[in-house]
Amino acid sequence: MHSFVRPNTHIALRLPSGILKVIEVKPNTSINLGKYGTFPACLLFGRPYYLTFEVLDKDDGRSSTELRVVPASELHAEALGEEHVASESRDEPGEGGGAEFDIVGEDGAVIMRSNRLTIDDPSRQKLSMEEIEELKKAGTGSGKDIIAKIMASHQAIDEKTSFSLAKYTLRKARKYLKRFTVLPLDVGTLTEYVTEKEAYKVLEVREESLGLISSWANVHHGGASRYLTAQDEISQIGGGRWLVVDDTGGLIVAAMAEKMGILYPTEEGDEESEEEDAVTESFAEAQLGRSISRDREGSKEVSLNGTAGETTATRDIDTAMPDASSEPTNGTPTTSTPAPNPATPSTTSNGPSKSRKHHQHTSQMTARTNTLTVLHPNSQPNLAFLKYFSFDSGAPAPSHPLYHHLRSLSWLSLISPHEDPAYDEPELLSEEALAGLKSSKRGNYYKKRRRWEKTSMVVDETGRGGFDGLVVASTMEPASVLKHLVPLVRGGGRVVVYSNSVEPLVELCDFYSKERRTAWVARQYETELRKPNGKVKKEMKEDDEDKEEKVNGELDGDDDADFPVNPTLLLAPSLQTARARHWQVLPGRTHPLMTSRGGAEGYLFTGTRVLPVEGKVEARGTFRGKKRKTVTEDAVQT
Amino acid sequence: MAPHPSPFLDPGTCAANDTLGIIQLRRDHLIPAVLSSTTDSDYAEGKVENTRFGSFPHSTLINQPWGTQILASAVDTGSRGQKGKKRKREKDDEGDATPGQDAEESRRDLAKAVTASSGFAHLIPPTPETWTLSLPHRTQVVYTPDYSYILQRLRVRPGDHIIEAGAGSGSFTHAAVRSVFNGYSREQAAQPPQQIEDGDEARIGITMKTRKRLGHVYSFEFHKPRAEQLKAELEEHGLGALVTVTNRDVYHDGFCVPAGEDGKLAPDADVIFLDLPSPWLALKKLTRSLPSQAVLKAVSSSDPSTPSADTSATTPQLPAADEPFRSPLNPKGAIRICTFSPCIEQVTKTVSAMRSLGWLEIDMVEIMAKRLEVRRERIGLQEEGLRGANPSPASVHEAVQRLRDVEGRAHVFHSLQKEKQEVIMRRAEAKKRGEKVAPLKEELGDGKQKVNFEALPPSKHDRLERAKKDLEKREIFKEGRLVHRTESEIKTHTSYLVFAVLPREWSKEEEEKARKKWS
């Protein structure tokens, strides 16, 4: 992954000013970096990431624009050089201490000056603005000459302390050096890019929050996980499935998908092959994982409920794929067939395309393990940021792993599926009737059937619950989201809610507070006593992720105000935040950065879904003070 | 051993026998337990976890769905000690002479656990987070805020190979396995690999291709008992096939290990995490090609203070001369590294070594994490005498009202006193005059006084009584102001994290090839 720059992918360029520029590199185009120069995109193809290039163009006497790789030693030259100086001056501990003395080396040469004599006056730079502009136009030697000339014509350059000289040089370098660094556009780089420009679009989520979210939600590759049936024979458990509510335009989904190994389209030449353009792997690696999981003894594998028509075809893929990819010859560099055109990623996976030939359409969202299920408030999910990872949620390419592993459904389909027209089964036509239809109508018919199959499968499976975790990063009221989604999380599953401000989460913590839980349990107990066969049984059933109950039997209205969520379903609700502080590390000048981005800190609510015991539970334990008391539901502290 | 999926990666529906389960008592009080249905225990119920929230026999945990609230059982913890000791002594005395008796004992049925009247816990599946909170500490632990950021910044993804040096207590190891895991290889599933001993690199060369690059953690630990314990733990957690634990001094002997089952060169690392006292010494072993003497000198000269540095800088060069150089790094991609050091001096040395060795994108950060506690702050006079609240006045109005009450009572009391005084005076005067005096009681005990008392503001005693009585009707869970604050104990410094990237090596020939191919 990300071993070299490929055509038609998004990459990030870091300019000398520190600004990130995200571009899609297309063949036969040129990349314009403004004052830092212009060069043809093909000069980047096949080159590794993280290299820094210098633009050498016609001004430097070349016939065509070229890129020069700036070696690491050159990039670090300044820091390493200073280090030498710093280590020398370290030998004389008396000097450079608290007082502002000039530091003089053994041979009498001044190594470090104090800023006692510094004069703050722009006129000390002899070059005028116009002259500098002239120099830029003449443009010799990738900016280095300009910097050298500017430095040379600064009247008081030798009055500067070495620190201020370094700063001055750096400032000039940022302005004039025609350099850039090529970075892979992964979740980390994208986060940096987006938070610099339009942080509000991603709820100001920082990298540290993304890390915490993935860790606390226990997000990992679940391709090998078993997809099991719970004891009630209805609910599903596990399978590496996570539920997401994402109002960050898909950034949270991308971060989770990265951790699950389904974000990046498998690129040829990444892994085994020596030849860069050999095909190695099909997109269907998860299917392989699934076939392994099927082999596992003791797992009650639920087979896909084939409904009609196309679903059978889907099943064909599902069973055919692992066979195809487990052929020992497939993927070895010697026997692999070169891709017809490496520039078009959609045609690269030719293994599966062969098996796909006899049915033109590959159903979307068919993967059953290692999946992300996105709940969205509008009829379509907003996953705009996934475009940087070659996934267009409007018209997804079947070769992208998210095509199979990303599922989406609207809140309407979850809460009341029968109001969603896509959930109503379109009329099933017989073979003869179909044969009589016009081809366009037949196509339409199949399209409708497929849409219905997709929707009903996703809605039904989501309703069966048992998700391994729930991640919420939404502008919606957290309690309203958790009320509906926590019951869909498996016992022991993780619930994580991100918010850019702390107040909604403080409120949420309060809804799961120890006191509220105690009150809830007491109330349940009372009602149970009053009518032994009534309401309580019903509500308890809801805890058991019974889908029917969930849809129809919502909590009674009078409980809603005091108990917007069932407080007994989450264990150890906690609130946390983390912030990275960046440092400058230079010999003798190590300190935290003077400025950094403010704004939202980013807070995280975490909890574990549990299955409470029915009836009254007495807690035990020692409490503060001498009295030993028995209090209901007090042992697990919030 | 059956290809048991690790409970960390796929816990299944229920807590199975012989797998790790976590018993959560409080938020930060978790007990890890390998659940076992053996009868080989001193308790009648088999294996039991005793906590201050009750006793939990394993038989009440096994085959329970994860997340279940488990009620404590009444376990006889008193008589077991003596009986156990006695039995042990017997065994010691008779040696191996009584296998039949032992077998008989283990065949006996477990006593059915009786639910206790109080106490409960929750049974949850293990995750790196819960394990980090509950693991047996051997060294300083890398906590969740740090490792989550590290794994995020290092872009650790399924299928990556990660080197971890200074495995320590294994918290990072577990988190790293979760990040790189993308399936078990068939061989791994079939047989757990043996502990790799240093030096048998002869097995390299079995070339067998697998399609998918499987994620793997290469863990190095200098301290032998710690390495062995980690190894045992990972085996117990079903992660043994995904982690190679090597007991080695990486400063001297580097990071190359014998090839794995797939016959490929190992570690072939993409990501490196160094939690070592002197990361710059390990950095010399993490190069793409044999570093030049000048560079090595630069790296070791950056560390004049540590005497061990000089010796290690010279000695490893000798064996390197007769052995062909092998890089532990993946030649195909950029290598991401993170070093974890508590002191700023370590950072300075590490960063300068990185600069000498050609690492780029060097960045140092410090993670400041805190947990917040949320509570309802109840302030007001109605809280007088109640626990967990502040009984001072909630507002100026309340304060004034209270002062009025106090003054009112004082006034009544004083006028009462005055009256009493006057009565006494009058009686005294009357006595003096020789008049007959009625008993005192009558005069004070008349109805007028009583009415006066009822109209009085309540006494402290009355107020306390009333507060207690009101409490039963109040809904405390939604009273008071909702506040949040940093928890009482915070970690203000864990370590400095230095991140860097080593790009893929790029030669003139490769540049030429790329130029020809793409233009």
Image: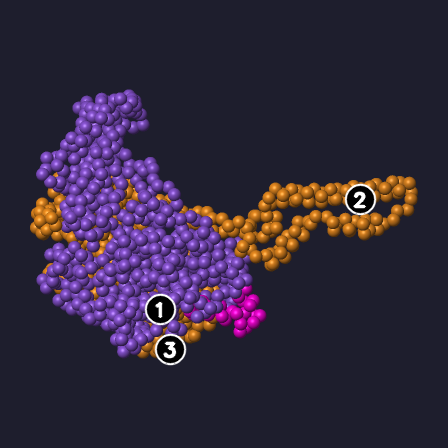
Chain colours: A purple, B orange
Residue under the point 60% across and 58% down: B473
Frontmost of labels 3 and 2 is 2
Chain under numbered label 3: B
How many numbered marks does the figure carry? Answer: 3
User: Dot 3 corresponds to which residue?
Assistant: B108
Q: Amino acid at mark 3?
A: Arg
| SS type, badge 2 | helix
Q: Which of the two residues, A428 or A31, is positioned nearer the viewer here?
A: A428
- Going by the numbered disc 1, the residue's amino acid type is Ser
Question: Residue B89 shows which numbered tag?
Answer: none
Q: Which residue is mark 2?
A: B420
Tell me the quarter of the picture where residue B156 sits: bottom left
Work out whether residue A34 can be spotted. Answer: yes
What's the distance in space between the residues labelled 3 and 1, CA to CA? 52 Å
Whether residue A542 is in magenta: the answer is yes
Query: Residue B409, image x and y in percent?
Result: 71, 45
* Label 1 crowd bin: few (<14), some (14–19), many (20+), radius 10 Å: some
C-alpha gap between disc 1 and disc 2: 89 Å
Magenta segment range? A523-547
Say whether mark 1 and mark 3 are on the same chain: no
Q: Residues within 10 Å of mark 3 (few under 14, many from 20)?
A: few
Secondary element at tag 1: helix
